[in-house]
Image: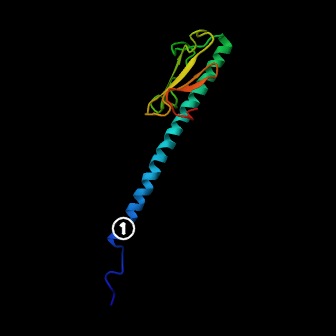
């Protein structure tokens, strides 16, 4: 004759497994979120470097930088393949007030997501890189 309590799990065993899974998830999820934000930042940095390279190419041909996409030689204003799928909006401004646009341009990538550590990423044509946030490792 079989005992009816010899098959399956008890409620205590199931609750222990659920508690262990909850502890592992509470440790892993913040780490996952940080990795996602780090990947998004790399998209922003890559877009800034690509657009700065285009600006330098334009400068070598015309001895000035451009800030507006209204010109015939327009640059992307976003970080991804399309504006809808990008995670950063990119803008070019006159970055060096003392030398003017003919000698210096400032590119900034504003995140479309909440990035409290780095905020807006910036690079200018002198090679200076910065971020509006206080976090380390933004660049």
- The number of numbered badges drawn on the structure is 1
The crowd level at tag 1 (other Cα within 10 Å; few <14, some 14-19, many 20+) is few
Q: Is residue 3 above or below residue 29?
A: below
Q: Position of residue 84 (x, y in %)?
A: 44, 30
**Residue at coordinates 49% horizontally, 34% vertically from top-left?**
117
Q: Quadrant of residue 71?
A: top right
Q: Position of residue 128 (x, y in %)?
A: 61, 23
Q: Is residue 85 left or right of residue 103?
A: left
Q: Residue lying furthest right in this view?
A: 60
Q: Residue 90 location in percent, x, y? A: 51, 24
Q: How is the image coloured?
A: rainbow
Q: Nearer the viewer, residue 102 or 97?
A: 97
Give residue 66's position: percent from left, percent from top: 57, 13
For the C terminus, the quadrant is top right
* Lateral position of residue 121 relative to residue 113, left or right: right
**In the rendered image, which quarter contains the N terminus?**
bottom left
Say what secondary structure mark 1 lies in. helix
Which residue bears the numbered disc 1? 14
Task: Specify whether 100 is left or right of 8.
Answer: right
């Amino acid at each position: 004759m079989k005992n009816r309590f010899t098959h399956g799990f008890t409620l205590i065993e199931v609750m222990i497994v659920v508690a262990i899974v909850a502890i592992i998830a509470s440790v892993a999820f913040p780490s996952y979120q940080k990795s996602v934000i780090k990947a998004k930042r790399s998209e922003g940095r890559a877009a800034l470097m690509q657009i700065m390279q285009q600006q330098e190419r334009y400068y070598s041909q015309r001895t000035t930088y451009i800030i507006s996409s209204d010109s015939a030689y327009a640059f992307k204003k976003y970080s991804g393949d399309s504006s809808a799928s990008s995670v950063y909006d990119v803008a070019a401004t006159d970055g060096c007030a003392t030398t003017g646009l003919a000698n210096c341009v400032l590119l900034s990538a504003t995140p479309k997501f909440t990035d409290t550590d780095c905020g807006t990423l910036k690079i200018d044509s002198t090679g200076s890189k910065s971020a509006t946030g206080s976090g380390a490792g933004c660049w």
